[in-house]
Image (cartoon, rainbow, N blue to C red):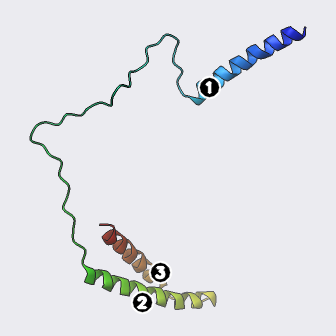
Amino acid sequence: MRDSFLHRLAILLGIWISVFVQTMCGQSVPPMAPLPRMDAPPTIMLPRGTTETTAPRERVNPGQLRSEARQFLELSQSVQADFEQVSRGLLPKDLVDKLKRIEKLTKNLRSQINK
């Protein structure tokens, strides 16, 4: 009786493991199916005379960077004062415009620095 229980338990465990492995690994491969060869990665052949070119990098203007950084600093300092008014319940009408300008300056500075 005990041996038949252990036998059934082992069979169920084997089935459960095989189902689990098949679901976790995606598609199952049928037995005796040919497996793909992975000797070397495929080679891509380009026609003769073609070369890959990259776009020339634009030069960064240091004066423009300094100017935009200065504008960013001035706007951030003015926004800090505006937020003190917001904490008192007043919303300056140009606060949203200042925040949009800060965002635009930040994106522009980041893109120029990453070039």
Nearer the observer, disc 2 or disc 1? 1
N-terminal-most mark, 1 or 3 = 1
Q: Is residue 93 visible?
A: no
Q: In the rendered view, does 19 fall on the left or right side of 43?
A: right
* In the image, farthest residue toward the left: 49
Q: Nearer the viewer, mark 2 or mark 3?
A: 2
Q: Which residue has dot 2 on it?
A: 74
CA separation in Å, label 1 and label 3:
55 Å
User: Residue 109: image x %, image y %?
Assistant: 35, 75
Could you tell me residue 50's position as x and y percent? 12, 43
Mark 2–mark 1 Cα distance, whole angstroms, equals 61 Å
Identify the residue at image location x=43%, y=14%.
34
Image coordinates of residue 56 in percent, x first then y, are: 18, 62
The single residue placed furthest to the front in the displayed view is 39
Q: Position of residue 17 (x, y in %)?
A: 68, 22
Question: What residue type is disc 1 on?
Answer: Val
For image coordinates 62% across by 87% down, the residue present is 87
Q: Name which of mark 2 and mark 3 comes first in the sequence.
A: 2
Q: Which label sits on residue 96?
A: 3
Q: Which residue is mark 1?
A: 21
Side of 91 where 97 appears, left or right: left
Asked if labels 3 and 2 touch by Cβ distance under 8 angstroms, the answer is no
